[in-house]
Image: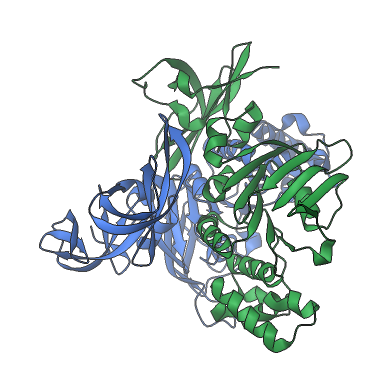
Amino acid sequence: MAAIELSGVSFRYPGSTGEAIENLSLNVDDKATHALLGASGAGKTTMLNLLSGLLLPTSGRILFGDRDVSAVPAAKRNVAQVFQFPVLYPRMNVLENLVFPLCNNGWKKLDAAARALEIAKELGIEIVLEANVSALTLFERQLVAIGRALVRPDVALVLLDEPLTSVQPELKWRLRRTLRKVQADLGVTMIYVTHDQTEALTFASAVSVMHGGHILQTGSPMEVHDHPEHEYVGFFIGSPGMNFVKAEVKRGAVRVNGTALASTDHAEGECTVGFRADWAMLAPDGLPVEITGFRPDAVQNGMPVGIASLKHDGNRLHVRAEGLIAPGPSHVQLKHHMLFREGRRVA
Amino acid sequence: MLALDAITLRAGDPPLNHVFTDAAITVVLGANRSGKTLLCRVIAGLTSPHSGELLLDDAPLASYLERPVALVTQSFVNYPAWTVADNIASPLTARGVARSVRDTKARDIARKLGLEALLHRYPHELSGGQQQRVAIGRALAKGARVLVLDEPLVNLDYKLREALREELRGLLVAEGLTVIYTTTDPVDAFAMAHDVVLMEDHGFVQSGAPLDVYRQPKSFTAAALMSEPTVNALSDGKTVGAIRPEHVRLTRPGDGAVKELQLLVEEVETNGTHTFIHGLVGRDGWIVKVEGMVRAEIDRPLQVWVREADILRFESH
């Protein structure tokens, strides 16, 4: 296993005009779990292929530990990958699938079987070693696929590409828990690529939010949620995403069309005020809005609670509310807020 | 008004009776394989029911081609070699409507759906959400009164799902269509439904306004279906209690009678907005839903509380 370092990596697909990945730098500690989180088109798949060696960077360096692998093709990188759907040899049993990567690397049969058993125990699949993989559930097959990725002790990096996709929703957390347990037990470096914030925030100790071929922010799950450095990060993480309203700082207050929403000691000028649904409340005065809908999704202490949809200047906003909320004009007050300029957080 | 009169989907299935509210969204909520897709096909006229009748304004529905019902499936099929305009107008093409009329109609519909700028694009040049709107546009061009959407958001990522729920709802309600929308996700029901119909084993379990069904489920199954994530079970032999994940608390509630329980924590998952703590109470798997990002130690017991008033009790069988 190794620390992974990308410095100034760019990649452009042949024939395309723009960079799919542009001047990207990333550090993943040895034995760490790191998530690359972004919507489709953010550059996640290109990153996976750059890490596995299926694509080589147009410029920049990729280091595995102190080994420069920038020009090293996939077969020589010692990277294992787990895909969305279990990739296994359908005619082999579980044990044969697990020993296959080892025997290919010149392991003796007995040693390979011992190692396979060790990994199978770790994953809790030792009782199905003799079973043909076609007889297993998708959940079990994905465990075997994970086993295949982990069986070689010399693997430098394990890449996980939305590995929970094929598993039933109510079993996803079990597979994720197993993944985390084996990661900790075996001390493997894992990079987990996903568009799903729950998977990223739950699985990884560090999350990089990707957008347009860049990493906008890297931090702990708590940091990227509570302290987005970028408007897009605030929007992408959290359900609903952060609200944004054009504002200005004047005479010690954040103002929208002159209405003071919060005091601030930040420099005067135009900005965007960002607030999460639970940092705001409906009130008799404040930011004027139109309530367009209230769809409670729970009842707490007899009171319906949920997210109210609002419009302000044609912008859609979401605020947590409770009680009986009718459509019509209202106002919003802020309990907490952040300020952004040119997309970046300034306060 | 669309009504199901003692419809059975297959031999031996329970009869389905329901009157769908006109010009409103009815969400049919059920697990995979509960019969949702078959119900959609029966309403659209692609499959005949085993028995019973489908009535529109008290008259039996016409055969598939004349039926004012359109079906949009989860794979939102569009004609790949046709532009957005031609895709939207395709039901008119099939009827031999002149091109100039088709184009005007397609443009009107595209405007409503926010697709006007994309009329000359091809489906593969569109995002998932846009492709889906084209499929809905085709249903509108057909002049359908009833629109059946079979798990329309299932293939999309969560951020798009979030936006489309709100967008779709506004759009469908504005069009005055009677919408039947199937899903496995209670979040869709809360966000979109005028009425919700719960489905299990090809039968209807309960129907009503989403919050009414949430407050007063008739059975444990109904409580579980209308809960995201599913309810926790607490049995005392005579009755079985269903407790919603958002009603399990990490601090002792001040008011009324409470039950104190030990949860052995197995996993803590979060989407930033909520934290879901999975664990065991006795031998039952439980999930606790709390606001914000909360830490809890795995493989450790955690004290949790439930208000007696929040326990939904059902006869156990």
Closest to the observer, A167 or A19: A167
**What is the x, y in percent for residue B261?**
47, 17
Q: Residue at x 37, y 22 (%)?
A: B253
| Apparent side of residue A91 relative to residue B281 in the rendered image (left or right) | right
User: In this picture, is B9 found above or below B283?
Assistant: below
- Asked whether residue B282 appears in the rendered view, the answer is yes
User: In this picture, is A105 found above or below A297?
Assistant: below
| Colouring convention used in this rendered image of the protein | by chain
User: In this picture, is A116 found above or below A10?
Assistant: above
Closest to the observer, A82 or B77: B77
Q: Residue at x 37, y 44 (%)?
A: A321
Q: Which chain corresponds to the colour green?
A: B
On the rendered image, what quadrant is the C terminus of chain B found in?
top right
Q: Residue at x 55, y 76 (%)?
A: B111
Figure disc tally: 0
Q: Residue furthest top?
A: B237
- Asked whether residue A181 appears in the rendered view, the answer is no
**What is the x, y in percent for residue B137?**
64, 70
In the rendering, what colour is chain A?
Answer: blue
**What is the x, y in percent for residue B188?**
57, 48
